[in-house]
Image: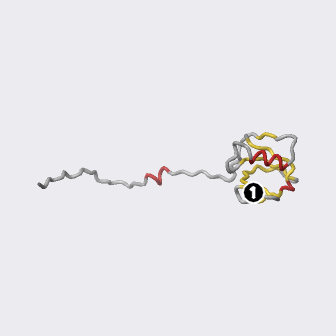
Amino acid sequence: MEKKIPKVFANKIEKKAGNNEDIYYSHEDKTDERKSSFTKIKGKNINQKLNEIFNSANYIYKADVRLVLKDKTINKRIVGRNATHLITIDNELIPLTDIIDIEKAN
């Protein structure tokens, strides 16, 4: 009781198949400035402001903030803190003693 199975019809592939190479696109530009509005946290010291940012419902593992330091103002993405420093997503350590004010992004 042998049955002959019909042959499968398949077209010849005559051109290069590089679909994933043609479609993939990655945009990472370090000079691209993050454009967002910032909200001041009023009437609190630096530790209270940081606690409010890290304990908010919007914070999962990172937060965009504007830091006003003694000598400049910078926009950073912070991921954590220890007793003396803020830790950014780029593994930079920013001393808490240098921070004058913090604004969180909306």
Residue indicated by mark 1:
87
Q: Nearer the viewer, residue 32 or 61?
A: 61
If the image is split into quadrants, where does the N terminus sit? bottom left
Residue located at (77% from left, 44% from top): 104
Q: Position of residue 3 (x, y in %)?
A: 14, 53
Residue beneath the point at 70% across and 42% down: 57
Residue at image coords 81%, 40%:
40
Nearest the viewer among 71 and 100 is: 100
Residue 33 picture location, percent across and down = 71, 47
Q: Is residue 36 left or right of residue 10?
A: right
User: If the image is split into quadrants, where does the C terminus sit?
Assistant: top right
41 or 20: nearer the eye? 41
The correct choice, above or below, for 106 with respect to 25 in the image is: above
**Tag 1, which secondary structure?**
strand
Q: Position of residue 15 (x, y in %)?
A: 36, 54
Q: Residues within 10 Å of mark 1 (few under 14, many from 20)?
A: some
Q: Is residue 1 left or right of residue 72?
A: left
Kind of residue sitting beneath label 1: Ile
Q: Position of residue 94 (x, y in %)?
A: 80, 57
Coloured how? secondary structure
